[in-house]
Structure formats: structure tokens, C-alpha cells
Amino acid sequence: MFDFSIVTRWFHELLVSFLPVGAAVFLECVLIGLFLLLLYALLACAMIFMERKVCAAYQCRLGPNRVGPWGVFQVFADVLKMLTKEIIEIRHADRFLYNLAPYIVVVASVLAFSCLPINKGMEILDFHVGVFFLMAASSIGVVGVLLAGWSSNNKYSLIGAMRSGAQMISYELSIGLSILTIVVLTDTMQFSEIVAQQADCWFIFKGHVPACIAFVIYLIAGNAETNRGPFDLPEAESELTAGDHTEYSGMHFGLFYVAEFVNLFIVAGMAATLFLGGWMPLHIPGLDGFNAAMDWIPGFVWFFGKAFFVVFLLMWMKWTFPRLRVDQILNLEWKYLVPIGLANMLLMAVVVVFRWHF
């Protein structure tokens, strides 16, 4: 498996050879930031195109098929169109908070996105409390949603923001319990170490029943956390027009739209990292030839393949089940997922203490 830190170390030594250390580090930070934003934008476009195609398949349609081969340039055409749209100022709205809200949502999404370990030696943010940082960074997005609903001076927006805030804060608890179940198994909160411990077997197999239960709870709670069907009540178009971003137009609306899809990828990427081995190839004990062949596949190919597989599962869930009511969404969380998650975490602790895992 190729270690990308070899490339980053060589590039750092190259810059230090003709620049002061401070200037070299600053230039590296700028380049990493630009790379992160470019990858963020490309993933958003890929996710939007995938959503349209998956939706069309479930509804027996073709989806985008006119602009470019197989309609791949339709998303870029829509982005260009949205960039030319006017950003309308709402009368009697709190203009500062109204304009600030979409950027808070995007910043929270970028911070969480930077925690994903894409390849060996290619972790942008990787430290000992990575799990805590991810949970804290992803929680900032709730603030942007609530500000957007309150500052728009629109009852639909306010109701959608209140629904979204209650739903996102509630389901963060189940996500946290699912992640802590894996932390109990690994005894670490560093994502690179969590991936490294899956070299011989992925945790969804290694952790027995508790890991499988945590995986299912994580998928359900992750779908609700990103406000996607069947948990998309905060922006139910039949009731609230578009929810908390009803009054937004132009690129401000585009920022909310992009952040929603990248948040979906972040949920899928964390599921791939915690349960499916992240960038680690599939290794089967005893099959050395098979394991050696799997090691030839680059780590980022494994990571993105697993992440998009989980994305497909989440989209499958959205386009299969009907929308739930508000009381059903909160009952599912507080009466079922939280108690099951707590019991499952205790069960994982028992499995670890008695060494019943592989």
C-alpha cells in the first residue's frame, strides 16, 4: 500500500530548500486549502449527478441525458446558471445573519470533510481526539441552519429551522453512540489508527453483532442528520416550500445545496472509515496471494468506492420509504435508537473485555 506521506515529505523538503520554514509551511497550508475546496466542489457535483441518476432509476426515468455524454455536464451547467442568479435581499430580514448563515454551514461541512482519511499518509486533520473534533465541527452546521430560519423573517423558514434543529441535535446522539461503540473496540479516537487496526479484518466483521447494530444505527441517524428522506421534514416542499432556505437565492442557496450533498458524503465516508476499513484493502486471513493482489489497488480507490457504496445505500433509503411525521421522527430517536445504541455500546464493552472479537 502506497504511503502518500512520502510525497508530502519530499514536497516539504523541496520548499524548505529555497524558502524559509515559515513561508514554506504557509504555502503548504494554502495549497492544501485550495486542494480541499476543489475536492469539495467536485464531490458535490458528483453527488448531485449521482442523486439525479439514482432518483431517475427508482422512478423509471432516464435522468440528465442531454448536456454532455450521459448528461455529466448538466450539473456544471446548473452551477454556472446559479452563479449568475441575483442574490435577493429580503426586506425586514437581519441582513448580517441572513448573509452569514450559508457560510457557517459550509465552514462546518469543510471542517468535518477535512477529517476524512482518504489514503495512507493523506490525512489533512489527524490527531488523537479526531472523533471529538469531527462531532464538534459537524455540530456547528446546526447554528447556521437556525440562523438562516430566524433571520429570513419568514414563518416557513422559521418552522423548518426549528424542525431541523430539533432533528439534527437529537440524531447526533445516536451517531455519537455508534462512533463510541467503535472507539470502545479500538481504544483510540484517532482516525488513522482506527483504519490501521482494520488491516486484518474490517470492524463490521471483527466487531461481531455490536458492530453490525452500530452500523445500521449510524446509517439511519446519518440520514436523519443530513435532513434527507424519509427524514426530510424540515424542508418538506408540500408544507414549508423549502424549509429554512426558502428565502435564499443565487449562490447563497447553492451553498446550502452543496453543503447538504457533501454532508451526505461525509456521513458515508465516516461509515466507510469506522466500519468498512476506510482506505484499507480487503484482506482475508490465509489467502496471501489474494491479499497481495488487493494491496495493488490504491487506498483512495478503496475509500471512495466504499464511501459511494454507502451513499448509494442512503439514496436507496431516501427514494424507497415515505416521509415520516415529526412525532414519528423524534419517537424513533428517543424511544428506540438511543436505548438500543446505549445497550449496544455496553454489549461491545463486554465483547472487548472477554475478547470475543476476532
Image (cartoon, rainbow, N blue to C red):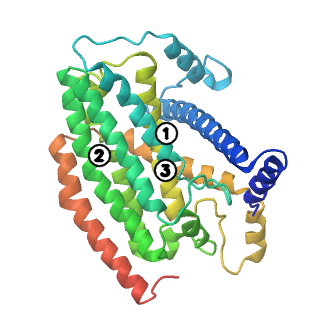
Label 3 Cα crowd, 10 Å radius (few <14 / some 14-19 / many 20+) = many
Nearer to the camera, 247 or 323: 247
Q: Earlier in the sequence, mark 3 or mark 2?
A: 2
Q: Secondary structure at mark 2?
A: helix
Label 2 Cα crowd, 10 Å radius (few <14 / some 14-19 / many 20+) = many
Q: Up-down: is 281 above or below 285? A: above
- Report the residue marked by disc 3: 268
Q: Residue at x 79, y 50 (%)?
A: 16
Q: Earlier in the sequence, mark 1 or mark 3?
A: 1
The N terminus lies in quadrant: bottom right
Position of residue 197 measured from the top left corner of the image (x, y, whole percent): 58, 73
- Report the residue marked by disc 1: 262
Mark 2 touches mark 1? (CB < 8 Å): no
Q: Up-down: is 151 above or below 205? A: above
Position of residue 263 measured from the top left corner of the image (x, y, whole percent): 45, 42
Instruction: Answer with left or right where residue 72 lies relative to residue 217.
Output: right
Instruction: Answer with left or right where residue 24 lies relative to residue 98.
Output: right
Res 354 quadrant in image: bottom left
| Amino acid on which disc 1 is placed | Val
| Amino acid on which disc 3 is placed | Ala
Q: Secondary structure at mark 3?
A: helix
Res 35 quadrant in image: top right
- Numbered label attached to residue 168: 2
Instruction: Answer with left or right where residue 237 lies relative to residue 210.
Output: left
Instruction: Answer with left or right where residue 61 lies relative to residue 119.
Output: left
The answer for how far apart the CA atoms under marks 3 and 2 are is 17 Å
Position of residue 17 measured from the top left corner of the image (x, y, whole percent): 84, 50
Position of residue 42 measured from the top left corner of the image (x, y, whole percent): 60, 33
Q: Residue at x 56, y 54 (%)?
A: 125
Nearer to the camera, 316 or 227: 227
The answer for how far apart the CA atoms under marks 2 and 1 are is 16 Å
Q: Secondary structure at mark 1?
A: helix
